[in-house]
Amino acid sequence: MENLLYQVALSLIERVGPITARLLLSHFGDARSIFEARPRELATFSGITEAIARSICQGEALRLAERQLYWMERYHITPLFIKDPEYPERLRRIDQAPILLYYKGSCPFNNLRTVGIIGTRQPSTQGLIQVERLVEELAPYQPMIISGLAYGIDIAAHRAALQYQLPTIGVLGHGLQHLYPARHKKVAQAMLENGGLLTEYPFTTKADPRHFPMRNRIVAGLCDALIVVETARKGGSIITVEYANSFNRDVFAVPGRLHDKTSAGCNWLIKTHKAALLESASDIGYVMRWDAHNKPPAEQLQLFETLSEDEKLVVALLKEHENLPIDRLSIDSQLPAGILATVLLEIECKGLIRTLPGKRYMLIR
């Protein structure tokens, strides 16, 4: 509990964001050592002014953290610190990941597959039908469905996940004392049995329009794949897609008729190559190579043994990293550009790697 107190306090330091908090953690090793450091040492970090350093040493955040611990114990809220093994691994990999999350629910986050489903708050009947159809088609892959519990497409995705017995997580833009919108309380309670509610905001934090763009980065960060079903050209869904693209997540959009306002955003995402066109959930299974993951390990081993020496070299480099840009692969492999391009194409055709936006490559594990 003492370690948790310092961890919660680290997330509550005013004007210290997740990137600075992770730098402090990296330097000091643990949260407690940060609060025991001298102001002069803290002030050497970028983003830590003398005033912030004094505030840390005076323990203002620690006093706030004591109250959070009380709420967590009373309402059975699980804290997820960024160094905890239970912390969502996909989210941990991004620089903007919250240093601490508050979770209420029953499902571990590090499932094999995760799919985010987002869209307009005012969907058409066809849009709602598409959400249910996609979730039904996704059910054989057994993904966790992630959304923001908002009106429209979000709540339709959660309801469909519950209907098809898939775990579903609602990412909130407020603390767990509240639920916005309140009319989704019944669905949220059902989600606690197979999934749950997640937020970076302390218990009593109220919903605020400024919080929702930040909430969207968490939705994007939790996903393997993000699906957009009906959205305008501007809004929260487009913000979430921008985050997903920057995190190298696969984004899919359901196309619509040219002059439908609710489809304008999806059509634009497809036209500008920010999202792949989605007709059915089988498109996701194909692009994500989820069916390939069901092949026996012996088949993968046999395939690896048939690789050329250059192909084995590139695969070995990708094993050491989550993903690598082609420039880095060229330097590390010392292969001429033409040969490297041929090698990457051959490996991709064999189903061992996947191309990401920005000419980056990742190994399909």
Image (cartoon, rainbow, N blue to C red):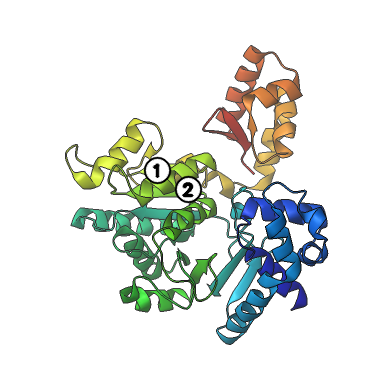
Point out which mark residue 225 bears: 2
Q: Would you place residue 160 above or below residue 18 in this image?
A: below
Label 1: few (<14), some (14–19) or many (≥20) C-alpha neighbours in 10 Å: many
Name the residue carrying label 1. Answer: 252
- Answer whether labels 1 and 2 touch (C-beta < 8 Å): yes
Q: Hey, which quadrant is residue 97 in on the image?
A: bottom right
Describe residue 169's horizontal placement relative to residue 303 as left or right. left
- Determine the residue located farthest toward the front in the rendered image: 51
Look at the numbered disc 2 and give the secondary structure of its residue: strand
Q: Earlier in the sequence, mark 1 or mark 2?
A: 2
C-alpha gap between disc 1 and disc 2: 7 Å
Describe residue 120's horizontal placement relative to residue 17 as left or right. left
Q: Amino acid at mark 2?
A: Ala
Q: Residue at x 41, y 68 (%)?
A: 207
What percent of the width, then of the height, locates residue 130?
Answer: 28, 54
Describe residue 323's horizontal placement relative to residue 140 as left or right. right
